Image (cartoon, rainbow, N blue to C red):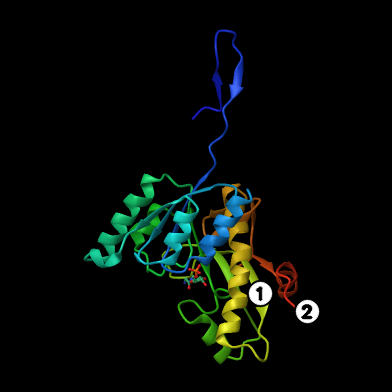
Amino acid sequence: MSDASNTGDDNTFQAEPAEPPRVVVLISGNGSNLQALIDAQSYDELGGEIVAVVSNKADAYGLKRARDAGIEAVALPHQEYESREAYDGALIKVIERHEPDLIALAGFMRILTPIFVQRFFGRLLNIHPSLLPAYQGLNTHARALADGAREHGASVHFVTEELDGGPVALQAVVNIAADDTEATLKEKVQAREHLIYPIAVRWFLEGRLQLVGDDVTFDDTPLPPTGLRLSHADAAEELDENDAT
Ligand code: GAR
C-alpha cells in the first residue's frame, strides 16, 4: 500500500489516509474485556480497528456486544470439529481472512495448538486474571484467597506454547482485603483488566510493545518478568475505588 498517490497531471501528491491497524478478538463468553476494547475504539483510544470477533461458543454474550457495535461476529463452535488441530486450522482460516495485525484473546477459554501459536507468534496477546507467573490456569481468585495471598491482579501477556506462560507486558495489582470474597475479588480484578487491556493493545499497535525473542520490549527496552506494573494505589485511583491506599 502506498502512502501517497498522484492525483492528476499537475504532479501534485495527496496523502491517502492510512488504514488503521486491524484487530481480531477471540472470546468464549461474556466479553466484558471485548467491551473495554470496543469502548476504547469508540473514544479513538485503541490505536486500531476491531475487524472481527470470533467465539468458540455460539451463545457467547460477547457476540451480541460485537454485533451491537457493528463488528463482524463469527461463531465457530469447537464441538463441530473432531480434533483440536482441526478446530485451530479452521480458526486460522477465519482469522487470516481478516488480515489482522493483532489477535487479542479476551476470555478465550481454549488451549491453543502449537501450529496456531506459531502462525501468529508475536501478534497474540492474552489477558489473564492473576499476577503471572502466579496462578496460571483456572480459578485464580479462589486459589489466591485460599493461599492467603496479600496481592492479586491481572496480566496482559504475549501468548507462547506454554499455557499462560508467555512473557508479561503489563500488570495491574489489587491488594486483597480481609473481607474479600471470590466475587468481590473477581470484580476488582476485572476492573483492572478493563483498564490495562486497551492500553496494552494500543501500545502494541503503535509498535511500542513488542515480543523480541523471549523478551517483551517497551520502546525498545526489555521489560522485567512482571512487565510494566500498575500499583494497587494507582489502579484504585484510576478506577475511583474507595480504598486507594
Ligand atoms: C477474564 O477475567 C479473563 O481474564 C479470563 O476470563 C475472563 C473473561 O471475561 N481469562 C482467562 O482466565 C484466560 N486464562 P470476559 O469474557 O468478561 O472478558
From the viewer's perspective, is residue 91 above or below residue 234? above
Q: Which mark is residue 245?
A: 2
Callout 2, which amino acid?
A: Thr
**Could you say whether the residue bearing mark 2 is in a helix, strand or loop?**
loop
| Residue at far top of view | 9
Question: Is 216 situated left or right of 58 in this image?
Answer: right
Depth order, front residue of 188/221 = 188
Above-or-below relation of 10 to 176: above
Residue underneath mark 1: 173
Q: Quadrant of the C terminus?
A: bottom right
Position of residue 210 measured from the top left corner of the image (x, y, whole percent): 57, 53
In percent of width and height, residue 221 lies at 66, 54
Q: Is residue 71 above or below residue 6?
A: below
Q: Which marked residue is nearer to the observer: mark 2 or mark 1?
A: 2
Q: Bin the neighbour count of mark 2 within 10 Å (Cα to Cα): few under 14, some 14-19, many 20 and up.
A: few
Separation of residues labelled 2 and 1 (CA atoms): 12 Å
Q: Callout 1, which amino acid?
A: Val
Name the outermost residue toward the front.
68
Query: Is disc 2's CB within 8 Å of ligand 1?
Result: no
Q: Secondary structure at mark 1?
A: strand
* Image side of residue 95 versus residue 7, left or right: left
In this rendering, position of residue 181 left or right of residue 119: right
Residue nearest the observer in this picture, 96 or 179: 179
Q: Earlier in the sequence, mark 2 or mark 1?
A: 1
Labels 2 and 1 touching (C-beta < 8 A): no
Q: Which quarter of the figure has residue 145? A: bottom right
